[in-house]
Every structure is written in structure tokens, then in C-alpha cells.
């Protein structure tokens, strides 16, 4: 493998897979039964495990909160497969873990000796907890900025309302972004770190979707009718925001709205609650939890263009808080299973039975590497390579200059393996593109 440009680590680069052949396009996924997906438990004991989060680069760890033998919620992580590892042990509640973009830290909310919830972080490899806030107000739901430099959260402050705040991730002075006499909550950073979207209970008397520049400035309302809007999430390109809304159907439905403003678009319409949507990496699908005819919350895929939804699970247990990493076909959630406790479950819906496979279709793979663009390292997912084709993975710098083109032919490709149909992971850094390793 030839080395890339010596300036690679000093510049931004963009990866694209051009004319790459895949076995399972969105069209194929939506035209065949999804019972071929595999669901399995990662935890098994008699404690509740909740709010799982994939590590963002190599997705080899999942962090979550567990109410363990201490009697408190603690921060844990687990590989798949593998044994749980406790990261916190203090007799305080540790909740809502969130990975830093470089996977080196996990932030969370914790009540401590102040008597209030504060924002903490801990090395993801284990170590000493570091407190980031310490005043006499409660702080909730930390969210790392995509560039890793700041953490946003909402805080009930001296205004007696919850406001959107941020703080440097290395510690420092809190910065208040909102100030008025309404509750603001559940902040989410835009992919470029320039905006924060959140819910606000405004003059309509309902929760609406708002955004504000992360550097501070004027709030911008994205929704404004007489229905509550909750759980906003950015699309990977930053152009849309998805959320659930209790609308005229009398149920929570999945909606999206342009992040620059515009008309809301309903994506689901039936007489069941749909909640906590998450975008797929290619943005053609959205995953959510839905209370369906089974009488339990199941995991569903919803077309991001509306009109279609498909169940991934269908048993007699509640499946909640689905999380989609930056890679296609993998999901994690907590499920109250036969143990009668919430356990961490993992789902691979790309494990389709052989007789359900279809002919390959030509497409560009989008948003299957993270981060992208990148400066020093990224992780790439390749999916379902076909035999004997002449595809290439092209690396561009920020100006659009082609830096490197790596051949991806399934026979004797430059990535060091015969890429038979399947899912592969590889790493690109400042010197080369690594070998493709197939997921098993």
C-alpha cells in the first residue's frame, strides 16, 4: 500500500465509495421480510440496564447505565460479545452516558455531595471521575459537540426554568445560551457543531422544536402548532431534524422538518405511538420504538421519505430507546426480557437469510464512515461487495483534490482480502488505509 500525502494529517479529507456494488440496497431491504435479522442479549443478570450508546468510531463497546448491587445507577460498558465492566462505583446516581467523539471519555449526569445533578466525565478505559459543574442547580442530559470541544446540557437555573447551557469539555466556565421564562431541554448538536436544536415550551403552551447558534445568539423556531414535539435528532447532513409529535391522530407520530425552516412532514400515520426516532447513516431510514399490535414497544424502521414502516422485532417484550451507530445495519436498545429486567440487546438486521439475497445494484455509499470529513483517522464500513467489479474508494482533500484511489475489486483488492459478500470495517489514518476486516 502506498503512503498517502505527507500532509494528510494536517488537512481535512472526504471518503467516497464510487460505483460500489452492494447486496442490500434500501429498496431490497424494504421489499423482503426482515425476520432474517439477528437479535441477541449482551447482558443477562438481575439488574436493570438502560440507555445504551455505541462507541462512535469502532463501535466495539457499548456504554449504558446499570442499577447494580450498589443500589445506584452506575456507568458500565460492555464489548460485544464480552463481560460487563463497571466504570463508576460511588454511591450516587450516574445516568445518561454519552461517548466523546474520540471515544476517550464518557460524560454523564451525577448527583453528588452538592445535592444536585452535575455533569461529570470519566475516561472510557476507566479511572477517576472528573466533575465539570458544581453549583447549586441540577444539570441534565449532557451532549458532546461533534468536534469534542464542548458539552451541552439543560439546567434549571436562577430563572426557575431549564435553560440550554454548554461548558468546555476540559472544564471551565459554563455558558448560558437561553434566558427567557420557558423551559428548554434535550439539546442536540448539529453535525458541524454550529447549531444546537432542542425542545422549548413556548407561548403556544406546547413543546416546540427550536435551534440556536452554539456560539450564542437568537433562538429560531422550527415548529409552532398546537401539538407537543419531542426528542429532536439531526440528520447526518444537518439538513433535517426528526422528532415525534402527538398530532391529530391522538398518537405520537414521526415527523421531520428542514433545519433551515419549512413545513413539517409526517412520516407515520397509524393509530400507534411512535417514539424516539434516530436517523440511519444513509438517511434513507429512521429507526424508532413503536407500541404496535403486540401490545409492546417494538423496534421499527420508517422510511425517511414517508409511507413505509417495517418491524424488526415482534416478541412479547418492550424494546426501548433504539440507538443507531454511524454504521449501517446495527442497532442497540434496552429490552425488558425473560429476566424481567431491562437488558442491553444488540440487533444486526443485515443478517438476512441466504435465500433472501437479491442481485447487486449500483450505488454510491454515503455516510458509512465516521468521522467524515476527518483529519487523522476514520473508520469505514463496506457492505456486501460483489464479485469481479472495478469499484474504488476515493479520498479527497477539502479543496476537492483526489489524494488517493484504492481499488476495491473483490478479487485481490488493495485492502488485502477477497471481499466476498458481507460487512467489512477498515481504518484510514494519516499514512494508509488498513486491511478490511469482515464482521462475524
Image (spheres, rainbow, N blue to C red):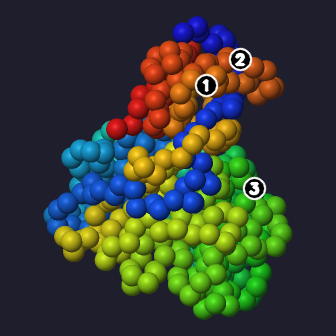
In front of the other: 287 or 77 = 287
Q: Are marks 2 and 1 in contact (CB under 8 Å)?
A: no
Please name the residue shown 43% across and 42% down the image: 59
- Residue under pointer 3: 239
* Viewport quadrant of the N terminus: top right
- Residue under pointer 1: 389
Please name the residue shown 21% across and 67% down the image: 47
In the displayed image of the protein, which residue is found farthest to the top? 2
Q: Are marks 3 and 2 in contact (CB under 8 Å)?
A: no
Q: Looking at the picture, how far across and down is residue 416, in whole percent?
A: 46, 16
Q: Looking at the picture, how far across and down is residue 228, in whole percent?
A: 64, 83
* C-alpha separation, residue under disc 1 versus residue under disc 3: 33 Å
Please name the residue shown 82% across and 66% down the image: 261
Task: Tell me which numbered mark, 1 or 3, is placed earlier along the sequence.
Answer: 3
- Residue under pointer 2: 403
Task: Tell me which numbered mark, 2 or 1, is placed earlier along the sequence.
Answer: 1
* C-alpha separation, residue under disc 2 versus residue under disc 1: 22 Å
Q: Using a 10 Å C-alpha cutoff, classify the residue at mark 1 as few (fewer than 14 neighbours), some (14 to 19) or many (20 or more).
A: some
Amino acid at each position: 500500500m502506498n503512503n498517502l500525502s505527507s500532509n494528510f494529517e494536517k488537512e481535512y479529507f472526504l471518503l467516497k465509495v464510487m460505483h460500489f456494488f452492494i447486496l442490500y440496497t434500501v429498496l431490497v431491504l424494504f421489499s423482503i421480510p426482515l425476520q432474517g435479522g439477528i437479535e441477541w442479549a449482551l447482558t443477562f443478570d438481575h439488574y436493570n440496564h438502560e440507555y445504551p450508546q455505541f462507541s462512535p468510531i469502532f463501535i466495539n463497546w457499548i456504554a449504558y447505565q446499570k442499577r447494580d448491587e450498589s443500589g445506584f445507577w452506575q456507568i458500565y460498558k460492555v464489548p460485544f460479545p464480552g463481560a460487563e465492566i463497571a466504570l463508576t462505583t460511588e454511591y450516587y446516581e450516574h445516568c445518561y452516558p454519552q461517548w466523546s467523539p474520540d471515544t476517550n471519555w464518557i460524560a454523564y449526569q451525577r448527583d453528588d455531595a452538592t445535592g444536585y445533578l452535575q455533569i461529570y466525565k470519566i475516561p472510557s478505559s476507566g479511572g477517576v471521575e472528573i466533575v465539570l459543574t458544581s453549583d447549586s442547580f441540577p444539570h441534565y442530559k449532557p451532549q458532546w459537540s461533534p468536534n469534542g470541544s464542548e458539552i451541552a446540557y439543560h439546567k434549571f437555573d436562577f430563572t426557575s426554568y431549564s435553560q440550554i447551557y454548554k461548558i468546555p469539555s476540559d472544564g471551565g466556565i459554563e455558558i448560558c445560551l437561553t434566558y427567557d421564562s420557558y423551559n428548554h431541554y434535550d439539546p442536540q448538536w448539529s453535525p458541524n457543531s454550529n447549531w444546537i436544536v432542542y425542545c422549548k415550551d413556548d407561548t403556544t403552551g406546547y413543546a416546540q422544536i427550536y435551534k440556536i447558534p452554539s456560539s450564542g445568539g437568537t433562538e429560531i423556531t422550527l415548529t409552532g402548532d398546537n401539538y407537543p414535539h419531542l426528542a429532536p435528532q439531526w440528520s447526518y447532513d444537518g439538513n433535517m431534524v426528526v422528532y415525534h409529535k402527538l398530532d391529530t391522530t391522538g398518537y405520537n407520530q414521526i415527523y421531520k422538518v428542514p433545519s433551515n425552516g419549512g413545513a413539517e412532514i409526517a412520516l407515520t400515520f397509524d393509530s400507534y405511538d411512535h417514539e424516539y426516532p434516530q436517523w440511519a447513516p444513509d438517511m434513507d431510514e429512521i429507526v424508532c420504538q413503536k407500541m404496535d399490535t403486540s401490545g409492546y414497544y417494538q423496534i421499527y424502521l420508517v422510511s425517511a421519505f414517508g409511507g413505509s414502516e417495517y418491524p424488526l422485532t415482534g416478541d412479547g417484550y418492550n424494546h426501548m430507546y433504539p440507538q443507531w451507530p454511524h454504521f449501517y445495519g446495527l442497532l442497540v436498545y434496552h429490552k425488558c426480557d425473560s429476566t424481567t429486567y431491562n437488558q442491553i440487546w444488540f440487533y444486526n438486521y443485515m443478517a438476512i437469510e441466504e435465500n433472501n439475497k437479491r442481485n447487486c445494484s449500483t450505488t454510491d455509499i454515503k455516510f458509512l464512515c465516521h468521522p467524515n470529513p476527518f483529519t487523522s483517522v476514520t473508520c469505514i464500513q463496506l457492505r456486501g461487495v460483489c464479485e469481479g467489479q472495478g469499484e474504488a474508494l476515493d479520498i479527497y482533500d477539502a479543496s476537492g483534490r483526489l489524494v488517493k484511489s484504492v481499488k476495491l475489486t473483490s478479487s485481490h483488492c488493495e485492502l488485502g482480502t477477497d471481499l466476498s459478500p458481507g460487512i467489512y470495517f477498515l481504518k484510514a489514518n494519516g499514512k494508509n488505509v488498513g486491511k478490511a476486516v469482515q464482521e462475524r
